[in-house]
Structures are given as structure tokens and as C-alpha cells.
Amino acid sequence: MDSHELMSPCSCVWTLSQLVSMAAIKEESDYDSSRSSLTAPDSRRSWISDIGSSSSISVRSSIGGGDTPASSCRYKPHKANQAEWEAIRRLRAATGRVGLEHFRLVRRLGSGDLGNVYLCRLREPWSTGCLYAMKVVDKEALAFRKKLRRAEVERDILRTLDHPFLPTLYADFEASHYACLVMEFCPGGDLHVARQRQPGRRFSISSTRFYVAETVLALEYLHMMGVVYRDLKPENVLVRGDGHIMLSDFDLSLKCDVVPKLLRHTNLPSSGKLPPPPSSSPSSCVPPTIQPVLSCIFRGVHKCHHAAKERDAASDGGDDDSAESVAAATATTEPEVVVVEPVAARSKSFVGTHEYLAPEVISGQGHGSAVDWWTLGVFMYEMVYGRTPFKGETNEKTLINIIKQPVTFPPLAGAGAGEWEEMRTAQELMIQLLTKNPKKRLGSVMGSAEVKRHPFFKGVNWALVRSVRPPEVPPSPAPAPATKKVMMMSRKERQEPYNYRPEDHHFEYF
Ligand SMILES: Nc1ncnc2c1ncn2[C@@H]1O[C@H](COP(=O)(O)OP(=O)(O)OP(=O)(O)O)[C@@H](O)[C@H]1O
């Protein structure tokens, strides 16, 4: 069969195994592949409830329609000289489009709620060495499960991203009733697995600082693009070939409008006097498009820091009037900060992973970008202590703990003086991130700017984080599959249908 038939409009419905076989390597040897996908325990699965909008959204089969120059974002200035990007660009220039028939699937990297992710490479001989991750979702199955909208949201978000710590979408297209996203391949696995390899199954404070700092930058960019991530956890933080991170999995994310607003540093939550949500420039979660917006701009940050100290000193004493008077005294001289994050966005969807849920998500009172700062606190805690802070014996107990229990820290056995001091600063940051009231949580008013200023990140040069040597650099990917049998998918694996098990994803709390 001519592989181009795949894209011709026809009423045929192909099975995934047929499509995968067509795209798979021609050498049909049956290699044993013990590389089964990594699946997280049930309580760590992500999900979205019907509360809010998901169930009422009509199922539109609008994914893809073939990857043509106009169909997805083609402008990725940060990837300009990257071999993988260049290979796709060259293919598109030669053929006018990118489709499944241009790829060879090598093996399955993993599977999730929406579909399977495959390691693949281009068939063109000149593209040797360029590896990609292809997410394949069955649109019909998703439509049946009322989750097609999630796949569309993920595709739309990926199309807009261009950041060193976020996935690059090289192409997206349809093949029969499958929708395919071709993304950057991360050979280093995820941070959940990486943590298991650490001594005591915990990351050191300096490794934690590195990964958390990169995550902050990724969240900052997402927020500025009007995206609330909502699914931060170590399983979703992948490690690139160079050891830097890449956040993955955007199907639970929330798209919002972001409207820049000017705030003074005195409005920080630690002042105890919060500004009302800006009624003139609210963030809305409805519009389907995302427009890049301005970065945060600071003027006179040194003054900010000084004023913050004064304000903190006043509010530490629990004297609201004192805090207020300091705020008032500095109000006219304080620098202004342009905040472009969707801090006032509100969604009522019950979405996330049990151990990582923010209190406002559980209570259903509406949530916005502050949920990402809560999950950052849980993420950091798990990196440092090897477990999440509110985990109970059951999912229900976990949720109750999140709402009711204060965050506590296990004793740090055998820590030296230096490490103890660093740990104390880390704990301070975690406490501020794990503040149950989202309005008082670090990051809730001025976004990432507040988080980045915390003393835990003292010495971090935010502009150069991507040039810092990561704690671990994964070994180079294996040579091209044509010369390495172990990289090939077995016939059994290629033909295996996507196996959705509803019991893994069912959620019954509300
Ligand atoms: N770019 C990538 N590079 C390497 N592996 C990847 C990549 N993207 C995804 N994977 C692997 O595939 C698995 C499934 O991917 P992903 O989480 O995006 O799917 P999903 O269907 O959206 O899952 P979820 O149930 O978490 O929503 C991941 O856990 C990871 O192991």
C-alpha cells in the first residue's frame, strides 16, 4: 500500500496496529523488548472530574487535519539551529507536509490516560540521529470517553510553546482516527524514576534547587502564556539529553487570558494586606486562543527587597496595623511590577493527582495559577524527603490531610551544619508554597517574581540557569535503530492495541 493513502480522505478506519505497522521499520524481526512503559501507582494518576466544564464540552473532531505549513505553530526561534527542528523543516519544505508515513516507530516510551507515546525517527536517510517522541491518541476512543477536548487543549498549548524547559512540538497530524503529536524526545526518563536512584531515594538540596529553579522558570513562562499547568509532579518532569528538564503532559492544563497589571511590591501576601482581585482586568478561562504577553518587568528590585524585610518584620509580630503602616509608608516609593500571570483565573474543575491537589481544588471554591505554586511545594517536598507531605492511607484521607493538616517535616538525620541551614531555608519556602489559603500563598499575587526572590534561591542566576551543569546528564541515546536491534519495537509491541483500563483512572470522591 502506498503510505500516502493514509492521508487521503476516505471512510476507512485503520486500527492502530495497522497504522503503526505501516509506519514501523520495514525490518520485521521479532526483537524482544522488555522495555515496558512506566506507569505510576493509581493514587498518582492524573484525572479531571466532570465538575466544571469537561463533560459539557461538545466532542468536536477538530484535531489535526494534516500537518501543513498553516496548521500548527511553525515559529520556534529558540530551536532555530536544532538538528531535529531542521530535519522537520527540510522534510516539510520537500513534501509540503509531515505525516505518519514519514516516521519509523522505534519503541513505545510510555502510555497514559490519553494514549501511547512512541520513540520514532524520520525515514529520510539524511535525518539519521534525530529522534522524536510521538504521542498517538485514538480520537474515537477519547470522544467516547468525553476526553477529546483534553487532547485538543494539549495540542493547542504545545503549538504555542517555545521555551528551553518545555516541549517543542515539531509537527502534529492525523492518521485516520488517530491524532499524532511529534515532540522532543527526552532520553533521561522522569524525576520520579531519577529520585529512586538517589541515595536514600532523595535528592540533595543542591539538586533540588536546580530542578525546582528550572521548574519555576517553566511555570513562569506557562503563566505568562496564560496556561495554568495543574499537573506538576515528578513523573511529568522529564530529563532531556543534556540533563535539563522538560515539563510534559498538558492535557489537564487550563488556558486563560492574561491581562498585564501593575502592582507594587507592598501587595505581597506576607504583608497580610492583600489587594482585591483586579476587577478591571480579570483573567478569564474561556477564550480558546493564547497570545504571548510581556515578561515581568522590575524597577528598583533592591528597594523591593528592603521593603519586604521591613514588612515581614512588622507582620511577623502579628501586628496588622504595623504592617499596614509600613505598607502605607512605602506605597508611594515602592517599585512597580508588571504582573502578567493569570493570578485571578478561576476554574472549578476537579483536576490533578490526589497527593498534589491544592486545597482550593478539593474544596471546589475555584482555582487559578496559585495551584501551580502549591504543587511546586509538594514537588519540592517529595524531592527532598522522598514522599509527599499529606499522603494518607487512602486517597480520601490524603484529601482530608491536605485540607486540615499542617505541613510537617521529618527530622533530617545526620545533616551537617551547612546542610541544616540550607534545609531550614528550603522548609521556609515549602511552608510558604504550601499555604492553604491561596490568597496568602507565595506566588499568588505577583506570580513567579515572589517565588524567585525567596532566599532558598540565593545565588541562582535566573537568566543563566539553562547554562548551569545539571546534577546528572543521561548517557547519550543509543545509536540509530537500524544498527541497534535493542532499539526496535517487537512485532508484538508494535501491534499491541492501546489498552485503556478504566479502573486506573476512575475517581469517586465527589
Ligand atoms: N517527550 C518525551 N520523551 C520521552 N518520553 C516521553 C515523552 N513524552 C511522554 N513520554 C513518556 O510517555 C508517558 C506518557 O506520556 P503522557 O504523560 O504525555 O501521556 P498522557 O496520556 O497524557 O498521560 P497522563 O495519564 O499522565 O495524562 C510518560 O509517562 C513518559 O514516560
Image: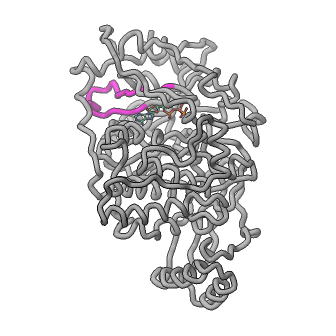
Residue at point 28% right, 46% down?
A: 472
Query: Does 124 appear in magenta?
Result: yes
**Figure check: 304 above or below 476:** below
Q: Is residue 97 above or below residue 267?
A: above
How many labels sit on residues? 0
Residue 362: image location, x then y, percent: 69, 46
In the image, 340 versus 89, the foreground residue is 340
Question: What residue is at 69 percent from the left and 42 percent from the top?
Answer: 350
Residue 90 coordinates in the image, percent (x, y): 35, 37
Residue span colored magenta? 116-133
Q: Is residue 272 visible?
A: yes
The residue at the point 71 percent across, 44 percent down is 349
Looking at the image, residue 40 sits to the left or right of residue 193; the answer is: right
For residue 209, side relative to residue 322 (left or right):
left
Closer to the camera in the image, 42 or 167: 42
Indicate left or right for 226 with 485 as reference. Answer: right
**What residue appears at the point 41 percent right and 66 percent down from the top-left corner?**
456
Question: Residue 464 or 291: which is nearer the viewer?
Answer: 464
Q: Is residue 35 above or below residue 186?
A: above
- Residue 248, x across and y down, in percent: 48, 41
